[in-house]
Every structure is written in C-alpha cells, then in structure tokens.
Image (cartoon, rainbow, N blue to C red):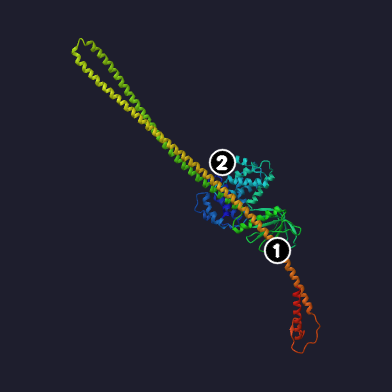
C-alpha cells in the first residue's frame, strides 16, 4: 500500500508539469507518452489500445487528473511488482517536472542533490493533494540534515523561520523546500561538498532505507582470511562492497526472521567480533571498536525484530507515528476550540441578556425622569395659578374694604367670595396631598432600580463563576498534558530496564557458551581415552597370529577369519578378554 502512495506522488508531479495552462487537464498525446514511460520504467507491458479504449468516450479535449486516475490504477498501478528500480522511476518523473519549476542558476546545490531533496519531500509530505510538507516534517528533515553535516541545530533560527511560515500558509511545496535547502538558509558557512554529503546521507537513510553503513572486517568462507569491506544495512539485507562508492558488490547477507546476531570473544588476533547466523550460513565480522560493534549489533537486531513483527522500515513506522500524533493533537485542538466556541456563545448570550436588562433599566429611569419632570411642571403651573388667584383676591379684598362703608349691600357677595376662597384652599391641600403621593411613587421607583442593580450584580457574579470554570478546564487540560509526559517518561524507564535485562541475558549466554566449550573439551578427552583403550584391547588379544593347521571338524567363522581357532581356544580368549576388561574398568 505504501509503495502505491509513494508512486502516486511522483506521478502527480509529472502530471502537474504536463499541465502547462494550469487548468488541471493534460492532452491525450502527452498522457500516452507518460503512460508508456511509466510502463517502461516499471517493467509493465504497455497496451496503447487500452488507453484509446478507456478514453474513447471523452471527446472534449484534454483529460483531467480525475479522468486519468482510473486508467492509471487499473492498467498500471494494479500490475506493479516490487521488482523494478524505484529510483529510476523517480528520476523519470523528476526529469519531466523539475525544469518547469526551479531555476538551477539561483541554487547552490547540484541537480542531483535537488533530486534527492525532491524524493525526501515525497517521502515526508502528507497524503493530500496538492502535495505539501508541514512544519513538523520540515523540522525533522532539517534536523537530520544538520546532524549529517555535523552542524549544531539552532532552535532560535528555526523558530524565526517558523514564525514567518505561519504568517503565510504553515507548509511548503517541493520546489519551496528545494529552494530553502539550495539557498543555504540553515547551512550558512558550509561548503557545497559538505551540504551535498549531508543530503546524500539523509537520502540514503530515508529513501534507500540504509539503516547503517561503514567499514568492517569479514572472515571468508573458503580461505578463512579477513578482508575489509564496506557494509550497508537495509531492513532485509546486509550488503558488503569493496569500498564505499558501492560500485563493486561482493555479496549479500539476507536478514530474515529466522536470523540471529551474537557477540563473539576475541580470537585469531581480532577484536570486537560478532556473528550473524542465517539459515544456511554464518558470517563472522569484526568491528573497529566496541562502540561500533554495539551499534551494529543493535541495528541488526532491530531489523530482525521488525521482520518478526511484520513491520516495514523504521523510518516509515516513525513517519506514521508522527502523523498519528499530529492527527491526535489536531483533534484535541479542534475539540478544545469547539468547547471554547460554545463557552463564548454562552458568554455572548449572557452579555446580550445583561445588555437587554440594562436597556430596560435605562428606559425605566428615563420614563421615571419624564414623569418627575411632568409632575414638577404641573406643580409649578398650579403654584403660578394659585399665586395669581391670591393676588387677585387681595385686590378684591382691598376694593371690598374700600367699599365696606359705602356698599354694605355687597357684604353678602363678599361672604360668598370668601367661601369660594375656602374651597380653593381645600383644592390646594388636595394638590399637596397628590404631591406627597408622587414622592412616595418616586421612592418605590428608586427601590425597584436598587433591586435591578442587585440582580445585575448577581449576573456579574455568575459570569465570574463561568470564567473560573473556564480557567479550571484549561488547568485540567494542562494536567492531562503533564500526565501524558509522565507516561512517556515511564515508558522510557521501562525501555531502559528492558535494555538492562537484555544485557543480563547476554552475560548469561556468554556463561553458557563457556560451559559448553568446557564440556566439549571433556568429551574430546573421553573420546581419546576410549580410542586408546580400544587399541590396547586389540593388541592384547593378538589380532595377528600364526596360521596353524586347523581341526578336521566343522570350521567356525569369527572376526579373525574361518578356522582361526577351535571352540576351546575361543572360550579361553573370551574369558581372557573379559578379565582384561574388568581390570581396565577398575583401574579407571
């Protein structure tokens, strides 16, 4: 499954390069050439009639990527066998697309190094089209590259670059990654040869599945001589070459689930020995030092364990684990964002409710103010009226006092006027009573306003409680994160304990080998003693004797030939042999 996905990535680059107008469609003639090239590189019989039959109903011109994909799956990818040269396939797709996307004059790396970076991009990119590589995989690749060049990793520099990348799109295309490496943004001060060697080492490790390589001494099977070879370890084989240019291969050690690797004691003047036991052969190898020996033992043992578990190369497994971790983190972030969104919506609803209540309070206060202003205006009008009435009454009284002497007949009218004034006084008192009632209403309105303010304070306390709940939820998320870190540390401690147990078992195995060698020497000494004893018995019994005339009776056939001796002589010899045997057993 992984092979088809990686092949599709390279084919996607080639298809996109053929799309000159960037409309997502390619002409049928170009697809014929592309299909023929793919079949040639992947050792698949090409059937041009099948392509014509597949696209015979599509008379609308160029074919889109969705239209070409069914033909690609059915007639090419379904027939792929893992026996073709994947590197040659990638070079063919690279040849179709690189000239249209990069300018080699602006890059400080060769075309071959750019091709290797392109292959690494296809390996680390996401399985989503158009292909991009995310920030985490960019950091993983650059760390590998800096380590291969022997340079230190700058966290601050990558953090600045990551900040610039986040402002754009948080990912890179293949050509942007090649430009990043080619312009030496992270490898300033390094010469071109060092950068090229670093890219090659990362390419061999990730793409060619080279888990480890280096010089070691190997013991021959025929002449038993020791020869220095360049060894290259891959997930299913340990190949050895004359030198590190890999031009002349001398052989392969097939690594499968039945193989085992063991350490050997120093012998024949060779140190740091170990042996690889396969089904038909065993290979003795000498490393340069103890550290290299331990690294090779661990690397080969890891390959065997992966084969026994039915897993692919460790780099593909690590890539899958990184993707699963990113997906898990993304799901957790989405969940947290959804919960924060829900809390924000609830907070906005509460805020809207508070705003509505505040508006109602303001409207009630405005209405109360208007009522107070109207009441005061009415009171002022009444006071003005009463004042005018009083002034008029005073004028009337003065006129009446002036006319008392003259017009006594008008006394009755004056008394009637007094009664009217008393009635007006009663009305004034009623108006004052209404004023007191309005003041009481105003006091009740103030109490209502105070109650509304208390309710607003209660709502504010409820909002603060919701805020505290949000803080507790964030603290709980942080605690869960710390718990995950603690679990990871516990797993690392378990791994160290397992390594210690493995070393203990290795020491016990060495002890068992030493006991086996002692028992072998004892067995050899016992076999020598038995051989000596048999020689003595043969000499004692006299296998060579003189030939004498035999008896005329029936001849007896024995181990010494027919008629060698009579029955009496045979009995004597049996008795003598039994006595000598008993004496030898007692002497031992």
In x, y percent, where is residue 7?
Answer: 58, 52
Q: Can residue 501 be seen in this view?
A: yes
Earlier along the polypeptide chain: callout 2 or callout 1? 2
Q: Residue 515 carries which label?
A: 1
Query: In the rendered view of the protein, which quadrant contains the N terminus?
Result: bottom right
Residue nearer the viewer, 215 or 388: 388
Residue at figure coordinates x 22%, y 19% from the top left: 419
In x, y percent, where is residue 583?
Answer: 76, 76
Q: Which mark is residue 544?
A: none
Q: Quadrant of residue 170?
A: top right
In x, y percent, where is residue 31?
Answer: 56, 51
Give the CA separation, mark 2 to mark 1: 64 Å
Residue nearer the viewer, 484 or 105: 484
From this view, report whether residue 445 is shown above or below residue 11.
Answer: above
Q: Residue 166 carries which label?
A: 2
Residue nearer the viewer, 577 or 216: 577
From the viewer's perspective, is 479 left or right of 182? left
In x, y percent, where is residue 557?
Answer: 74, 84
Looking at the rendered structure, the secondary structure element under dot 2 is helix
From the viewer's perspective, is 446 left or right of 521? left
């Amino acid at each position: 499954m992984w092979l088809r996905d990686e092949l599709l990535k390279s084919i996607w680059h080639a298809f996109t390069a053929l799309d000159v107008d960037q409309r997502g469609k390619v002409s049928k003639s170009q697809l014929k050439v592309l299909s023929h090239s793919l079949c040639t590189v992947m050792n698949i019989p090409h059937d041009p009639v099948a392509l014509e039959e597949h696209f015979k109903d599509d008379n609308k011109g160029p074919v889109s990527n969705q239209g070409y994909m069914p033909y690609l799956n059915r007639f090419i990818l379904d027939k792929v066998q893992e026996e073709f040269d994947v590197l040659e396939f990638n070079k063919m797709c690279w040849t179709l697309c690189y000239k249209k996307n990069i300018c080699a004059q602006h890059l400080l790396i060769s075309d071959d190094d750019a091709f290797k970076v392109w292959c690494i991009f296809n390996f680390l990119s996401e399985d989503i089209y158009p292909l991009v590589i995310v920030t985490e995989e960019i950091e993983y690749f650059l760390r590998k590259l800096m380590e291969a060049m022997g340079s230190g990793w700058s966290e601050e520099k990558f953090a600045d670059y990551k900040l610039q990348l986040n402002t754009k799109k948080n990912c890179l295309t293949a050509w942007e990654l090649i430009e990043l490496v080619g312009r030496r943004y992270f490898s300033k001060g390094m010469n071109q040869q060092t950068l090229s060697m670093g890219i090659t080492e990362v390419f061999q490790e990730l793409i060619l599945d080279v888990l480890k390589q280096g010089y070691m001494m190997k013991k021959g099977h025929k002449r038993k001589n020791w020869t220095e070879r360049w060894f290259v370890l891959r997930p299913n084989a340990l190949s050895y070459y004359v030198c590190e240019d890999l031009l002349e291969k001398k052989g392969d050690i097939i690594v499968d689930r039945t193989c085992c690797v063991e350490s050997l004691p120093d012998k024949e003047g060779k140190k740091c020995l170990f042996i690889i036991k396969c089904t038909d052969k065993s290979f003795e190898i000498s490393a340069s030092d103890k550290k290299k020996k331990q690294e090779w033992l661990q690397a080969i043992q890891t390959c065997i364990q992966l084969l026994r578990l039915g897993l692919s190369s460790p780099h593909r497994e690590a890539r899958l684990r990184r993707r699963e971790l990113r997906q898990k983190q993304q799901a957790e972030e989405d969940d947290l964002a959804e919960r924060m969104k829900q809390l924000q919506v609830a907070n906005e609803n509460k805020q809207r409710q508070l705003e509505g209540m505040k508006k109602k309070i303001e409207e009630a206060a405005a209405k109360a103010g208007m009522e107070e202003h109207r009441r005061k205006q009415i009171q002022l009008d009444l006071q003005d009226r009463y004042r005018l009435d009083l002034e008029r009454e005073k004028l009337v009284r003065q006129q009446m006092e002036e006319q008392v002497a003259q017009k006594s007949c008008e006394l009755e009218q004056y008394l009637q006027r007094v009664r009217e004034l008393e009635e007006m006084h009663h009305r004034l008192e009623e108006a004052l009573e209404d004023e007191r009632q309005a003041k009481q209403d105003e006091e009740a309105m103030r109490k209502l306003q105070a109650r509304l303010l208390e309710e607003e304070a209660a709502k504010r306390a409820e909002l603060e409680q919701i805020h505290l709940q949000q803080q507790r939820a964030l603290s709980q998320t942080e605690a869960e994160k710390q718990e995950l870190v603690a679990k990871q540390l516990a797993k690392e401690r378990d791994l160290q304990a397992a390594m210690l147990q493995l070393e203990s078992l290795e020491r016990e195995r060495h002890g068992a080998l030493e006991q086996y060698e002692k028992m072998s020497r004892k067995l050899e000494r016992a076999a020598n003693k038995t051989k000596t004893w048999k020689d003595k018995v043969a000499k004692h019994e006299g296998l060579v004797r003189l030939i004498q005339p035999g008896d005329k009776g029936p001849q007896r056939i024995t181990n010494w030939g027919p008629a060698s001796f009579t029955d009496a002589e045979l009995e004597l010899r049996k008795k003598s042999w039994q006595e000598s045997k008993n004496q030898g057993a007692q002497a031992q």
